[in-house]
Amino acid sequence: MKLAFFGDVVGKPGRSAVLSHLPGLKARLRLDFVVVNGENAAGGFGLTSQIAEEFFSAGADCLTLGDHAWDQREALTYIEREPRLLRPLNYPPAARAPGKGAELFTLPDGRRVGVIQLQGNVFMRQSLACPFAAADLALDQMPLGAVADAIIVDMHCEATSEKMAMGHHCDGRASLVVGSHTHVPTADTMILSGGTAYHTDAGMCGDYDSVIGMEKAEPLNRFQRKLPVERMRPAEGPATVCGVAVETDDATGLARAIAPIRVGGRLSEAAVSFWSAPSMT
Ligand SMILES: [Fe+2]
Ligand SMILES: [Fe+2]
């Protein structure tokens, strides 16, 4: 199976880039299933139903969120009626968080893809329940190669160590463990020893002439003066679409190959070549 995950879409430039590149990428790479992290799509903060529908129309099969899940209040109700939208799985039960954090999707050809979103606890604004225990429960419910033909885990957190630990925790039980949240792509796409594809962070889909997607002036001001002067606004230059593509073995659900995708904007381009896709433009 051919899967792709795209990192946090930031504001209008990120949305425009994803909407213009995703349909072509999905066709050229013959992607069976695409996950997009949408937690910063609405002006940098959260996701609206209208924006989500645009991503679905452009080829996203599932959208994930993160610590910005509820920045747009309509997400609290939209997620209850849209099963393709996931929030972090590991909210403590007392939170009674709406929506779901894991889902098993059935493709038109009958193959099934599981998606699980987890939120880490290191250096995050809010601690949730243990993501490792949550991963165990979800993976037990959709065993790879038995119930699910492929499983994508979006590990949403700040610390590279926590993401890498989650990769090893799920190794052999998921097709792909990929990080989101830091908005900067890492250079460590690899297949772990147990057969799970891994990437510490997919990077954002946004304007990299920025501080993690936001106009530079206000973050610089806050780092130096410790006082907010104005609202954070997404940087408005051309965005780079950042993600990762994985090919899995249908017999086991484990990864055969993984490669980064970077297209447009300021970052150096990275194209997927391992399933002989034509070059991306
Ligand atoms: Fe985040
Ligand atoms: Fe984010």
Image: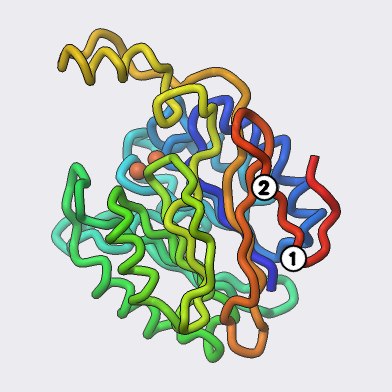
* Ligand 2 has an atom within 8 Å of the beta carbon of the residue at disc 2: no
**Residue 277 coordinates in the image, percent (x, y):** 82, 58
Quadrant into which the N terminus falls: bottom right
> Against 108, is 179 above or below?
above
Asked if residue 121 lies left or right of residue 182, the reply is left
Residue 171 coordinates in the image, percent (x, y): 42, 79
Check contact, mark 1 vs mark 2: CB within 8 A.
Answer: no
Nearest the camera: 79 or 125?
Answer: 125
Q: Is residue 119 above or below residue 130?
A: above
Q: Quadrant of ligand 2?
A: top left
Identity, as a three-letter code, of the amino acid under mark 1: Phe
Residue pictured at 30% horizontal, 45% vertical: 67
Q: Measured along the vertical axis of the image, is residue 33 above or below residue 203? A: below
Residue 158: give x, y in percent of width and height: 30, 48
The residue located at (67%, 47%) in the rendering is: 270
Residue 211 shown left or right of residue 124 in the figure: right
Q: Looking at the rendering, which quadrant does residue 117 occupy?
A: bottom left
Q: Is mark 1 within 8 Å of ligand 2?
A: no
| Left or right, residue 160 beside residue 96 | right
Q: In the figure, is residue 217 to the left or right of 192?
A: left
**Mark 1 Cα-neighbour bin, 10 Å: few <14, some 14–19, many ≥20:** few
Position in image of residue 188 (x %, y %): 49, 58
Rendered image: mark on residue 274: 1
Residue linked to disc 2: 270
Quadrant in which residue 240 is drawn? top right
Name the residue at the right extreme.
278
Q: Amino acid at mark 2?
A: Ala
Q: Which residue: 48% across, 60% down?
A: 199
Indicate the quadrant containing the C terminus: top left, top right, bottom left or bottom right. Answer: top right
Element at label 2? loop
| Disc on res. 133 | none
